[in-house]
């Protein structure tokens, strides 16, 4: 059977405060949980993962932890009693944007054109699609397939696909959600001073906290980043000063 995998197009942002990540220093280290998502998508259990350089060892850690149920589930996957790994079915928020990723089929609504194109590469699936269309049980519009056929739905469900570039607004919301997840790690970190952080995530977190009048969070995280960083960023300094004033602290 020929190897065929859809491109993995999804957010893989991970914080850098994980104990495993901080076990040793290396200037180009990648968080192992980010690597795990690629391994889970592109390989099957028992496959060999080749890391030609193995500078940090994170690929080996990622491959090993793909067999750890708790770690896999922490990434948003579902593991059944037989150890089979599935993507969790998506839920949408009030804006209609998938809560996990706009680039994954959730099992509801038409099958995206990218997935339909992939399915038509299979003779069996292509024949089912043609039969469903001919009988009127399925419809195809702008490349998207609306069907109730269980086989087609099952094969499409949880598949990743390249997002529609015309939906840049959705992708921006996903990016913001990823930044806020990272900010939450900073907030919960026990470090008095954050050693590694992204200003984008700090700005996104401060903005959200300000909108929610959560002044305590702004002050707490501001105290974890270097003073010069805070002073040199007008937006961060403005949010911090206002939060400090409104919180009633002296």
Image: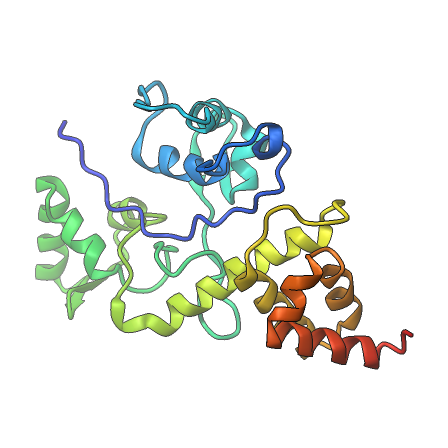
Instruction: Look at 66% across and 63% down and name the residue there.
Output: 228
- The answer to whether 249 is drawn above or below residue 174 in the figure is below
In the image, is 148 to the left or to the right of 100?
Answer: left
* Residue 21: % across, % down: 57, 34
- Taking depth in this image into account, of 152 and 118 the one nearest to the observer is 118
- Taking depth in this image into account, of 79 and 101 the one nearest to the observer is 101
- Taking depth in this image into account, of 9 and 146 the one nearest to the observer is 9
Q: Quadrant of the N terminus?
A: top left
- Taking depth in this image into account, of 121 and 102 the one nearest to the observer is 102
* Residue 12: % across, % down: 44, 48
Instruction: Look at 38% across and 74% down and name the residue there.
Output: 169
In the image, is 1 to the left or to the right of 78?
Answer: left
- The answer to whether 209 is drawn above or below residue 161 in the figure is below
Colour approach in the figure: rainbow
Q: Quadrant of the C terminus?
A: bottom right
Query: Residue 166's image quarter?
Result: bottom left
* Residue 224: % across, % down: 73, 55
In the image, is 239 to the left or to the right of 46?
Answer: right
Instruction: Look at 45% across and 63% down and name the residue there.
Output: 174
- The answer to whether 29 is drawn above or below residue 129 in the figure is above
* Residue 222: % across, % down: 72, 63
In the image, is 249 to the left or to the right of 155?
Answer: right
């Amino acid at each position: 059977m020929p190897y065929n995998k859809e491109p993995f197009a999804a957010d893989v942002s991970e914080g850098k405060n994980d104990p495993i990540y901080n076990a040793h220093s290396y200037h180009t280290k990648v968080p192992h949980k980010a690597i795990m998502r690629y391994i889970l998508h592109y390989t099957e259990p028992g496959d060999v993962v080749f890391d030609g350089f193995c500078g940090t060892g994170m690929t080996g850690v990622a491959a090993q932890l793909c067999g750890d149920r708790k770690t896999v589930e922490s990434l948003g996957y579902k593991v059944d009693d037989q150890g089979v790994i599935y993507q969790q079915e998506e839920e949408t928020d009030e804006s209609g944007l998938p809560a996990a990723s706009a680039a994954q089929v959730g099992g509801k609504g038409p099958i995206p054109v990218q997935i339909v194109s992939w399915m038509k590469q299979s003779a069996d699936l292509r024949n089912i699609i043609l039969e469903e269309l001919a009988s009127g049980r399925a419809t195809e519009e702008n490349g998207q397939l609306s069907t109730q056929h269980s086989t087609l739905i099952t094969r499409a469900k949880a598949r990743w696909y390249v997002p529609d570039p015309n939906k840049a607004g959705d992708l921006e919301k996903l990016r913001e959600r990823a930044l806020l997840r990272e900010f939450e790690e900073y907030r919960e970190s026990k470090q008095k001073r954050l050693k590694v952080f992204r200003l984008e995530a700090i700005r996104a977190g401060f903005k959200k906290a300000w909108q929610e009048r959560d002044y305590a969070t702004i002050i707490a995280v501001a105290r974890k980043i270097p003073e010069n960083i805070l002073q040199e960023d007008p937006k961060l300094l403005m949010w911090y000063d206002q939060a400090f004033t409104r919180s009633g602290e002296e």
